[in-house]
Image (tube, rainbow, N blue to C red):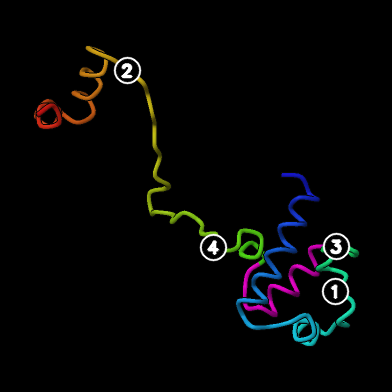
């Protein structure tokens, strides 16, 4: 996604969040200490939304910047485990190769259970 498309998405998401929180441009302007005309220009695309504005808006709305970008989804980092991160390895095998690998990884008894 290019920067212009991302900026459009951010604008749309801010508008949705304002509506959800029953806020308008004037109230957002008051929350971040800007003129209502500045907010209007940011949301109609006349003025670019830079990171500083995004940070101020997110803070005023009680959100993280990433949550405005991914709205309505909330971005969560994977949990770090004491022994590192989980890893998933996918290998496509057929026939005897598949059975041998499953035997090694799961043990013969577990493979037999999966086969039933």
- Between residues 106 and 57, which one lies in front from this camera angle? 57
Callout in the foreground (3, 2): 3
Q: Where is residue 74 shown, x and y percent of the image?
A: 54, 63
Among numbered discs 3 and 4, the one appearing first in the sequence = 3
Real-space Cα distance between discs 2 and 1? 57 Å
Q: Which residue is mark 1?
A: 40
Residue positioned most to the top:
96
Q: Which residue is mark 2?
A: 93
Highlighted magenta segment, given as a residue range = 50-64
Residue 53, compared with residue 92, is above or below; it is: below
Real-space Cα distance between discs 3 and 1? 8 Å
Among numbered discs 3 and 1, the one appearing first in the sequence = 1
Q: Residue 43 is drawn in which quadrant?
A: bottom right
Q: Where is residue 57 shown, x and y percent of the image?
A: 73, 74
Q: Which residue is mark 3?
A: 45
Q: Which residue is mark 4?
A: 74
Q: Main secondary structure of the magenta part?
A: helix
**Label 2 Cα crowd, 10 Å radius (few <14 / some 14-19 / many 20+):** few
Callout in the foreground (4, 1): 1
Query: Residue at 69% across / 83% down in the picture?
Result: 23
Among numbered discs 2 and 4, the one appearing first in the sequence = 4
Q: Secondary structure at mark 1?
A: helix
Q: Is residue 51 magenta?
A: yes
């Amino acid at each position: 996604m290019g920067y212009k498309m991302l900026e459009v998405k951010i604008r749309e998401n801010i508008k949705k969040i304002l509506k959800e929180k029953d806020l308008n441009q004037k109230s957002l302007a008051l929350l971040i200490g800007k003129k209502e005309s500045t907010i209007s220009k940011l949301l109609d695309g006349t003025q670019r939304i830079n990171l500083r504005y995004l940070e101020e808006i997110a803070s005023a709305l009680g959100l993280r910047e990433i949550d405005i970008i991914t709205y309505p989804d909330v971005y969560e980092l994977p949990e770090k485990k004491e022994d590192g991160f989980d890893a998933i390895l996918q290998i496509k095998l057929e026939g005897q190769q598949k059975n041998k690998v499953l035997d090694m990884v799961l043990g013969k008894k577990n493979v037999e259970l999966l086969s039933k």
